[in-house]
Structure formats: structure tokens, C-alpha cells
Image (cartoon, grey):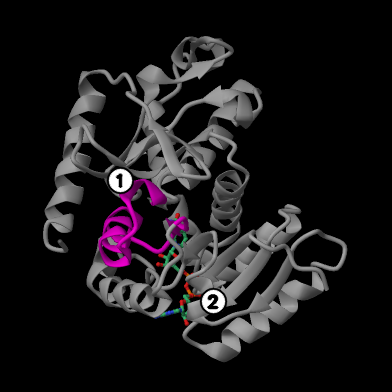
Amino acid sequence: MSTIPGNKVAVIGGGGNVGAATAFALIARGVPTEVLVVDVVDKAAQGQALDISDASFMMPGTCRKASFKEAGQADVIIVTAGARQQPGEPRSNLIDRNYTIIKSIMDSLQPIKSTAKILMVSNPVDVLTHIAQKTSGLPRQQVIGSGTYLDTGRLRNALSEITSVSPSSIHAYMLGEHGDNQFTGWSSARIGGRPLLDHPKLQGVDLESINYKISRKAYEIIEAKGSTYFGIGMCASTIAEALLNNTSQVFPIVNYVEGFGCYMSWPAAIGSDGVEQSFDVKLDGEETKKLKIAIDAIKEVCDKYQ
Ligand SMILES: NC(=O)c1ccc[n+]([C@@H]2O[C@H](COP(=O)([O-])OP(=O)(O)OC[C@H]3O[C@@H](n4cnc5c(N)ncnc54)[C@H](O)[C@@H]3O)[C@@H](O)[C@H]2O)c1
């Protein structure tokens, strides 16, 4: 078994569905890294790590169970640990339960490698990213969250079906708070260098129904099979790869936006130092109102966890 020195990704909560899907996606995407699976339930971490290691024999990455202390020395620390939503439960209900879990995880990881990047996935991801930054002691630019990247993927898939253009060529973002206060940046969206809303196949389409469908998708999946994990696993592994490989790719991720004074799902370029640039997205009047609602909602909760 080969290991890759100086290229480690830890998945805390890797015994669960999202953590295992993330660890598996790192291996299956061919990211040349050592994936460390950590969980408070040791047997769950062991089982997932052994199973995923079976998938690694023809890939450059490796996977094994590890301790919290080892995970603290990883280059990227992905946190998927926490209570998950019950059918019909809003993400905001999880805050108190997950605050305690995130604080104890950050304590167990100490000392955290000074150059590590933490990627929060556990919900509510915007607030938990703020809490992880406060409790980890790492600089803001090194602590981010998966945010509305998954929702943006859902949006691009939906728009791709309507316009017959590849999702990767549709430059449109879900913004704001991952959850009830997310909104689509329609006015800044582009396709082939043109405003997205000028596309002939979008004329007469009810945009609100697209938004509604996207915002309900997680609930629909949870109702049907208990939890969502494949999509977010792919998103988290893609973000981790960008951090490891210093790609400067732009993602709509939770990052600290100075102009808002809080963490927010907002487009940012990321690389080996974490957040390299956050962008000033153009919004129209309605979108500006929605952004204000999202900022107020996130700040109201974050103020309780200073
Ligand atoms: N950001 C997103 O887009 C997105 C999408 C899907 C799920 N999620 C979130 O991901 C989280 C995990 O969901 P899941 O379906 O994998 O749940 P799960 O119950 O399957 O897994 C959670 C895991 O966390 C572990 N855990 C709990 N406390 C821990 C601790 N202190 N240290 C280490 N491990 C601990 C549990 O043992 C379990 O294995 C939830 O908060 C869920 O809301 C986020």
C-alpha cells in the first residue's frame, strides 16, 4: 500500500453516510491523497475505511481509519459529523445539537496543523462554519463550508434540462444561506457570454417554480430514503481537491465576506491558502432584499456563538 506524504484529507464523521460518500468520492475521483476516516463510533469508521479501501486498489489514493489527533495534522479536514435532519425538520433545528459536537471535535483535533483547511459540511453549514472557525483557532480564510455548491449543482442541472446546455457551461449561482434563505442570482447568471434569462428556451418559464423545486430537493430525498449523501459527497471531494491542488477554482461556498460581516454562501476562488478571493456579485433590487434577509438570519444565530 502506498501513502502520499504531505497530502492528507481527514473526514470527521466518516462513519456516517455523508462522510463515507465523501471519502469514497475522493478515492473514486482519483485524488492522490491519503484519506483518514474518523468517527466517534470507532467501529463505523473502521467499517467504512475498510470498505472504501477495497475500492482504492486501482486508484492513486488510499483510505484508512485514523484518530482525531492524526486528523488534526491533515491538510484538509472535512467535517460531516453531526445530527442529521429528520423528515420535515428545518436545518436550523440542528444548531444546538451540532454546536456541542463541533466544539468537542475541534478540541479533540488539537493541535491543528497551522496550514490546515477546514471544510464544514454538517448542517446548518453557514452557522457551523462560523462556530468551527471560532473553536478551531484557524484564520477565517482557512475555514469554509460547502454552502450552496450542491444547490448550485441542482440549479445548473435543472437549467441544463431546459436549455440543452451542459451544466458546467451555465454560470449561475445559488447564493445566501444554505437552506430556507437561499436565492438564485438570476440577474448575474450567464450562458455563452449572454444573460441567462435572454436564452430563448427560458422565455415564459416560471423561475420561482425552479427555485422551489431546488429548495425542496433535499426534503424530497430525505422523505424517500432517509438522507442525502451522493451529491454532497461529490461536492465536498471536489472542493477538497481544489484546496489540495491549489486550483483557484470559483465555488459558491461558505466563506467570510468582509462586506457582510459574516460567513455566507458566496462565490470565492480557493487554493492552498484557503479563500483567495471573494467576489462582488451584481444583484438586482429583489435579490438585494433576499441577501439582506439571509445576512440578518445568519448574524442573528452566529451572534449567540461568539
Ligand atoms: N451541506 C450539505 O449540503 C449537506 C448535505 C447532506 C447532509 N449534510 C449534513 O451532514 C451531516 C451528516 O449527515 P449524515 O447523513 O452523514 O448523518 P449520519 O448520522 O449518517 O452520520 C453522522 C456521523 O457523525 C458521527 N459523529 C457524531 N458525533 C461525532 C463526533 N463528536 N465526532 C466524530 N463523529 C461524530 C456519527 O457517529 C455518524 O457516523 C448532517 O449534519 C447533515 O445535515 C449536509
The foreground one among 121 and 7 is: 7
| Residue furthest to the right | 58
Q: Residues within 10 Å of mark 1 (few under 14, many from 20)?
A: many
The type of residue carrying mark 1 is: Glu
Q: Is mark 1 within 8 Å of ligand 1?
A: no
Q: Residue at x 47, y 58 (%)?
A: 116
Distance Cα–Cα, label 1 vs label 2 = 32 Å
Between marks 1 and 2 in the image, the one whose residue lies nearer the viewer: 2
Q: Residues within 10 Å of mark 2 (few under 14, many from 20)?
A: some
165 vs 290: above or below = above
Q: Position of residue 250 (x, y in %)?
A: 50, 33
Q: Is residue 42 magenta?
A: no
In the rendered image, which residue does mark 1 sit on? 177
177 vs 233: above or below = above
Question: Circle 1 sits in a helix, a strand or a loop, which is it?
Answer: loop
In the rendered image, which residue does mark 2 sit on? 70
Question: Reading the chain from its start, which is encountered first: label 1 or label 2?
Answer: 2
